[in-house]
Amino acid sequence: MLVNLAQNLLNGLMTGMLIAIPAIGFSAIYAVLRYPNFAIAAYATIGAFAGWWLNSTFGLGIVWIILIAFCVSGVVGVAAEQVTLARLRPAGVLTVAIASIALNLMLENAVRFLFGNDLRGFDLAIQPDWRILALRIGPQQVQNMLLSLAIMAAVFLFLRYSPFGKAMRAVADNSDLARLKGINPTRIAVATIFMGAGLAGVGGVLLGLDTSIDPMTGARILLSIFAAAVLGGLGSIPGAVVGALLIGMAEEVSLLAFPATYKTAIGFVAILLILTLRPRGLLGERAL
Amino acid sequence: MLSYLLFTLTIGGIYAMLALSLNLIWGGVGMVNLGLAGFFAVGAYATAIVTGAGAPVIVGLGSALLAGVIVGLLVTYGTLRLRGDYLAIVTLGLAEVIRLIALNERWLTHGADGMSGIVAPLRSMVGSQAFNLGYLVFVSTVVILLWLLLRRLDHSPFGRAIKAVREDQELAAFAGKPVLRLKLQTFAVSAAVASLAGALYSHFQSYISPDHFQPLITIYIFLAVSAGGVGRPAGAVIGAYAVVAFLEGTRFVAELLPGVDPLQAAALREMLVGAALLLVLHLRPQGLLPERIQPARKT
């Protein structure tokens, strides 16, 4: 029993590390542009397919795949945002959110049009699980966790020390004041979308390495991403990481009590609970 | 051909009811319900289960309304006081959870097999052609009644109060409007209308399964309401029929494209739906029939 619990917590930690990357992307976009971007699901799917295509066509190594998938999703995200969403911002948060749902539908079906509905897996050497004490752990999962940690570290360093990162935080904190100080809001918006969509794409790749991918890959994790971001506090990047780890562990531990088919419902329950008890989330600002 | 037309118009009527439901909450208090397909499913399953146990259809419709209201209030009670984007996320999750329950609670919903043999009132007596015609008349009558009712609501003190909440809820609260109660009441009525649409769908189709309640339906209805004009019940109704016509029209066009397999054709159609919604939001955000704002009375 205790071993089962420990095993599920460990699996949950690894799931959480995967969700954390797109959740950071979602939260960064929310922090700077103040709208929930539903197209994050399609960006994850696009990243996953870009990575899979590079892997199966050129046999590229994992680091290259992640870098290129980041750029592909980022470029698609910026182009889509500028063409379809940017001009709607004055019309209000809900209008942009609804438009991002329409955008998500278009992108997801563009992937379906090009690649079909089949499941696809990365071409990876199959390795046996390691056994540590009584726990099973896959080498691929360990690699994913290390990659995820490295990406998180890069994001934190970027936001903390680079001029762009500092400007993003300034806009997120107070956009009027940031503009007064001469920060160009359009440039920051573009940089944020690039980073957010790119991170979603990387999340898609990591997910693809762990399981397999199809055009619904992003849509399936959307609820977990939202749950992570809301749990941590919408717009808070450390919050998104904490939220993702908690959601990942809650999803896996729920398997001990509920059938696996209800795993995605955990995210919803978490959203309801946190919004009823502490709407601003664990590390967020006010939500009223 | 005739039965196809009857079928399409009936579905149009059911979509019109969903559009009226969305228009009430979106055009009214300015919040969005991304779980419309979920409420649609709740109504459909509620009446299927109740009438399946032997209750008359009218009881089934009543329990569908009740189920919609209860689910709506349970889920939104904690979130209606928050900003609108939170409600959007919660309702999106709700629709997914309702679909999971419909898929997995086989004792209640028969899972992926769906529920068949749902009572179709009078069909065995009058034959299916007459039933389809009669049902179209029935659904259309309900749509017209709902439209008249909701239009009346728009011009009532309640309608003005919820639009005040939409424009500026702090100001509305300052003017003494019970903001939270207005939101709850509006959401409850909106959920009831969506559930009623589901119940009517259930008795029309005689068969429902989780596949009938894809999140895509919610997007269709958003397209209908924004194309028709947010805040204008007549616009929502016209928008819904227009969307059904658009969906049926693109079905034929997509089949004619050379070198495109059925899956790709379906993907193209869904892309068109997304593109249409984006185009409406960009080019005509006020919709076909813009909202009519009543001028303030001169004092």
Image: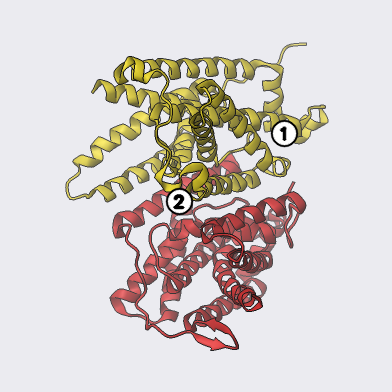
Chain colours: A red, B yellow
Question: Which percent across, then down, holds residue B90?
Answer: 62, 47
> Chain letter of disc 2?
A
For disc 2, the marked residue is: A104
- Image depth: mark 1 or mark 2 in front: 2
Residue B113, picture quadrant: top left
Q: Is residue A58 left or right of residue A43?
A: left
The number of callouts visible is 2
Amino acid beneath label 1: Asp
For disc 1, the marked residue is: B168
Say if B137 sits above or below A259 in the image: above
Amino acid beneath label 2: Asn
> Chain letter of disc 1?
B
Are dots 1 and 2 in contact, CB under 8 Å? no
Asked whether residue B25 is in view, the answer is no
Say if A226 sits above or below B19 in the image: below
Q: Give the label on residue B111, or none.
A: none
- Alpha carbon of mark 1 to alpha carbon of mark 2: how far? 30 Å
The residue located at (44%, 61%) in the rendering is A217
Residues tagged by mark 1 and mark 2 found on one chain of the structure: no
Q: In this view, does B101 lie to the left or right of B264?
A: right
